[in-house]
Image: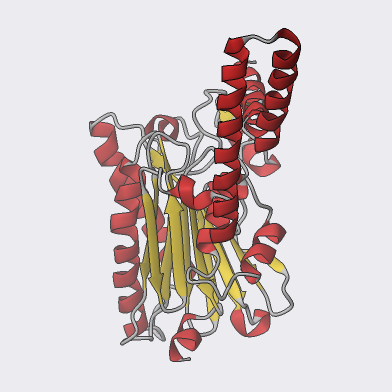
Amino acid sequence: MIEDTMTLLSLLGRIMRYFLLRPETLFLLCISLALWSYFFHTDEVKTIVKSSRDAVKMVKGKVAEIMQNDRLGGLDVLEAEFSKTWEFKSHNVAVYSIQGRRDHMEDRFEVLTDLANKTHPSIFGIFDGHGGETAAEYVKSRLPEALKQHLQDYEKDKENSVLSYQSILEQQILSIDREMLEKLTVSYDEAGTTCLIALLSDKDLTVANVGDSRGVLCDKDGNAIPLSHDHKPYQLKERKRIKRAGGFYQFQWAPGGSGILAMSRSLGDYPLKNLNVVIPDPDILTFDLDKLQPEFMILASDGLWDAFSNEEAVRFIKERLDEPHFGARAIVLQSFYRGCPDNITVMVVKSGIVARTEEQ
């Protein structure tokens, strides 16, 4: 009931901000005050009317300036007020990340490519923290490097190895989770994080997902191909697993009805891990790049997906691939403009295949 009330209040607050802060609303207020002044001739109201007119002129001027400089409608001004704005650009990869309306920045990302040695895949990761930034920072600083080392070892003796990209991903994700839980439990740090990792080689794309960060690919026909599936407690498979573990979900929000998680799988979160309600097991999918011939892929924290569907995001980025950040900056700021309350991190990898793009 509390969550429903908070959601309703949040919605009402967003509606009020949307209508009350619009220039048209201020203009109508000025007209109303002007009529009141005309009929009642109060000096105080006349002063208010004059100030309101000046305010409307200022707002209209600022809106005109913003619309001229940025087609996103004023988001450059808002961007300057973000406590943390991170960006990355290298060859065919671009990332844009903002703190947005949250008090803290808990998103992290990593890109590991090796132009000199293309025998092992490039690594791309999105980590959306919660309950603090400890878990996301830990996974970001440890997991990609561990994967890189194991992938290099695997490539040296690939023909005789019983491993695969999928097994290496699963082993390292679970290993990092165990390692992190030992440290966080000692310090009573309840932080957790999602984990979305993509390995791109010449012919294959392998994606491992834990939580509700999401990947989407644009194929040769412009279709949006899901690269991962969100782990939500209301999904049938997850709901059954949570029930078997002795937990339950409430208001389609958090396992155990605790209200602290909107996902059923994560790294970290030691109190819920001890109850086996939240698990770290990744879902791993592999895609044939020769068959899909992708134009680009999007990896993003759930801040983006609160504002965009897979299809909308693909269309939006497709129209902006020639921009400096391949549309990553534009879609992040548009998500903020649409009212997203969360941290927002978006990574766009152009042309789908690292090796091919870097050779162009």
- Above-or-below relation of 333 to 166: above
- Above-or-below relation of 253 to 295: above
Q: Residue at x 52, y 23 (%)?
A: 258
Q: How many marks?
A: 0
Picture quadrant where residue 18 is located? top right
Q: Position of residue 284 (x, y in %)?
A: 54, 61
- Above-or-below relation of 345 to 233: below
Q: Nearer the viewer, residue 53 or 26?
A: 53
Q: Residue at x 59, y 11 (%)?
A: 43
Q: Quadrant of the N terminus?
A: top right
- Above-or-below relation of 14 to 238: above
Any part of residue 212 in sight? no
Colour theme: secondary structure
| Left or right, residue 139 beside residue 45 | left
Any part of residue 46 in sight? yes
Q: Nearer the viewer, residue 291 or 42?
A: 42
Q: Position of residue 301 (x, y in %)?
A: 51, 51
| Left or right, residue 105 beside residue 319 | left
Q: Position of residue 135 (x, y in %)?
A: 34, 43
Q: Residue at x 55, y 77 (%)?
A: 352
Outermost residue toward the bottom?
360
Q: Nearer the viewer, residue 107 or 62?
A: 62
| Left or right, residue 103 beside residue 141 | right
Q: Position of residue 122 (x, y in %)?
A: 41, 75
Q: Residue at x 28, y 33 (%)?
A: 185
